[in-house]
């Protein structure tokens, strides 16, 4: 039994085979998937996709890489969505938001302001925070220490150091692992992953992005999650079953899901 804590199955690139993929996922034991919000214009489509399919859940937010697309009042629109839907079982988190200093000429002050607005909403509406963080761990950790969001969250596609991982874990965050550490050239990350505590790990595909080494150069998909789990379990020197069990329990814990109901 597996949970894909981060993907974009609502994107048009899955329109032709979403139903088939979901059936395939079911047969592989990929029981639940969280669709991740990136911009306001895509929220209603994401939400209706989650409502239409039992295994799919929704997170909404404004991605830090798309500041040019976001409008001034989008954060107020997010608040309106939360006013309407917070407490609905399908709305399981706020995400993805955070800081990305890897992109060309990041507007750090604007990213920071948007990041903090989301954290305020996560606290007010009592939702976990699903974070996108690239080359910005120090600022994200410092900000989380100020806000201490009680529901914690996930640092998606975690690729930081062991020390950074420890800081996130202390703040009640889990580390989202997917295709990136399956690549042999991801040396640094492949040294960090085996040191992570099993109760701090959740799994994700980030489909259609971050293809794992086993399926290079094609659209990534949640049906790859069992193979990602197997590759990461090997790196952690445990069995796939152990990693599946622990990561599923961790995700259920974070989202407040009853593991027996899966
Ligand atoms: Zn993503």
Image: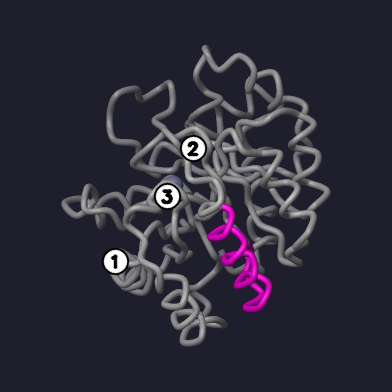
Magenta region: which residues? 112-128
Image quarter where the C terminus lies is bottom right
Task: Tell me how far mark 1 sits from mark 2, CA to CA.
Answer: 32 Å
Closer to the N terminus: mark 1 or mark 3?
3
Is residue 77 positioned above or below 138 on the image?
below
Residue on which disc 1 sits: 41
Say above or below: 79 vs 109: below
Mark nearest the camera among 1 and 3 is 1
Judged from the image, the secondary structure of the residue bearing numbered disc 3 is strand
Viewer-nearest residue: 11 or 73: 73
The residue indicated by pointer 3 is 7
Q: According to the image, label 2 marks what residue?
A: 226
Please tell me which of labels 1 and 2 falls first in the chain: 1
User: Whole-Å distance between the Cαs marked 1 and 3?
Assistant: 17 Å
| Figure label count | 3
**Left or right relative to 39: residue 205:** right
Mark 2 CB within 8 Å of ligand 1: no
Image coordinates of residue 13 in percent, x first then y, are: 22, 47
Which of these two is toward me, 232 or 240? 232
Q: Report how far apart the C-alphas of labels 3 and 2 lie in the structure.
A: 15 Å
- Disc 3, disc 2: CB below 8 Å? no
Q: Nearer the viewer, residue 126 or 225?
A: 126
Q: Quadrant of residue 260?
A: bottom right
Where's residue 198, x and y in %? Answer: 75, 39
21 or 6, nearer to the observer? 6
Seen at 66% across and 78% down, the residue is 124
Q: Is residue 124 magenta?
A: yes
Q: Residue 93 at x, y = what percent? A: 56, 66
Q: Main secondary structure of the magenta part?
A: helix
103 on left or right of 245: left
Q: Residues within 10 Å of mark 2 (few under 14, many from 20)?
A: many
Q: Residue at x 31, y 72 (%)?
A: 44
């Amino acid at each position: 039994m597996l949970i894909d804590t981060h993907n974009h199955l609502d994107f048009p690139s899955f329109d032709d085979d979403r139903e088939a993929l979901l059936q395939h996922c079911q047969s592989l034991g990929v029981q639940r998937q969280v669709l991740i919000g990136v911009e306001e214009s895509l929220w209603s489509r994401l939400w209706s996709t989650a409502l239409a399919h039992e295994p799919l859940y929704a997170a909404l937010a404004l991605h830090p890489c798309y500041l040019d697309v976001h409008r001034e009042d989008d954060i107020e629109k997010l608040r309106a969505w939360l006013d309407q839907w917070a407490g609905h079982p399908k709305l399981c988190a706020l995400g993805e938001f955070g800081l990305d200093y890897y992109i060309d000429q990041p507007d750090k002050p604007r990213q920071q302001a948007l990041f903090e607005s989301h954290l305020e909403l996560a606290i007010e509406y009592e939702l976990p925070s699903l974070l996108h963080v690239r080359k910005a761990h120090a600022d994200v950790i410092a900000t989380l220490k100020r806000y201490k969001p009680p529901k914690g969250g996930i640092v998606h596609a975690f690729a930081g150091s062991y020390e950074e991982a420890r800081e996130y874990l202390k703040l009640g965050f889990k580390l989202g692992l997917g295709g990136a550490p399956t690549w042999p050239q991801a040396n640094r990350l492949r040294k960090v992953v085996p040191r992570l505590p099993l109760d701090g790990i959740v799994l994700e595909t980030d489909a259609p992005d971050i293809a794992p080494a086993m399926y290079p150069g094609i659209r990534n998909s949640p049906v790859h999650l069992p193979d990602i789990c197997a590759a990461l379990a090997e790196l952690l020197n445990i069995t796939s079953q152990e990693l599946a069990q622990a990561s599923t329990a961790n995700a259920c814990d974070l989202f407040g899901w009853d593991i027996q109901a899966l």
